[in-house]
Image: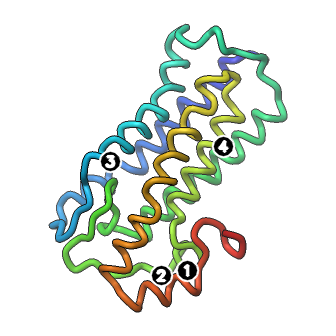
Amino acid sequence: MNPWVAKAVILAASVVMIAIRAPHGRRSRAVKTVRSSKGTREVTLLILAWIGFLVPLLWVGSPAFSFAEYPLRPTPLVAGIGCLAVGLWLFYRSHADLGSFWSITLEVRENHRLISQGVYRRVRHPMYSALFLYSVGQALAVPNWVAGPSYLVSFGILFAFRIRAEEQMMVDAFGDEYVAYMTKTKRLMPGVW
């Protein structure tokens, strides 16, 4: 199969992801932040995640990673497209359900309330679930040992170093309400984890 098929898929998925996130970023910046955990570690993790997201775009537009290419196969491509599509849908839903309470970094907004409906009814961190699905889809669809798994690796690192701090921030902000919510939901996947 022609690798340009995978390149077109990744380009389209990246554009959709940016189109989903952009309006929510503008809207959330308009709401005052009352508590922020934006420190050096948080900024470093976000930069790493951005690098992992941008590497496939570099692969699309240049021969920089041509040394790591392998043949594109239909089965992983189709599975990757499926993961990307479900990941992008969940990404959209989690942004829509959070509304102006979403933030790219760990922040509590003015008049912040705990969202426990929509996709948050059964999963505490559906946006992370969405990004994991997206990154697995990218790893499957991109026939390159560097560009394919780049976002999976960088996002995995961000998740590993951020999830406990985020959950502690939510316990601090919402107390027993968040603790009760934690007992009714799974972290990433309904009924599993």
Q: Nearer the viewer, mark 3 or mark 1?
A: 3
Residue sitting at x 82%, y 25%: 73
Q: CA distance from mark 3 to mark 4?
A: 25 Å
Work out which quarter of the rendered image holds the C terminus and state it: bottom right
The crowding category of the residue bearing disc 1, from other C-alpha atoms within 10 Å (few below 14, some 14 to 19, many at least 20), is some
Label 3 to label 1: alpha-carbon separation: 30 Å
**Eye-nearest disc, 1 or 4:** 4
Q: Which residue is mark 3?
A: 41
Q: Cβ–Cβ below 8 Å for labels 2 and 1?
A: yes
130 left or right of 79 in image: left
Which tag is nearer the camera, tag 3 or tag 4? 3
Instruction: Give the mark, 3 or 4, whose residue is nearer the N terminus.
Output: 3
Residue identified by numbered label 2: 116
Q: Earlier in the sequence, mark 3 or mark 2?
A: 3
Question: Residue 175, percent across and down?
Answer: 36, 87
174 in relation to 135, above or below: below
Q: Quadrant of residue 69?
A: top right
Please state which amino acid type lies under the numbered disc 1: Arg
The answer to the question of whether label 3 and label 1 lie on touching residues, with beta carbons closer than 8 A, is: no
Amino acid on which the number 2 mark rests in the picture: Ser
Q: Give the quarter of the image for residue 137.
A: top right
Q: CA distance from mark 2 to mark 1?
A: 5 Å
Q: Which mark is residue 44?
A: none
Disc sitting over residue 121 in the figure: 1
Q: Residue at x 52, y 82 (%)?
A: 182
Provide the residue designation for mark 4: 136
Q: Residue at x 49, y 81 (%)?
A: 117
Q: Please give left or right for residue 174 compared with residue 91 in the image.
A: left
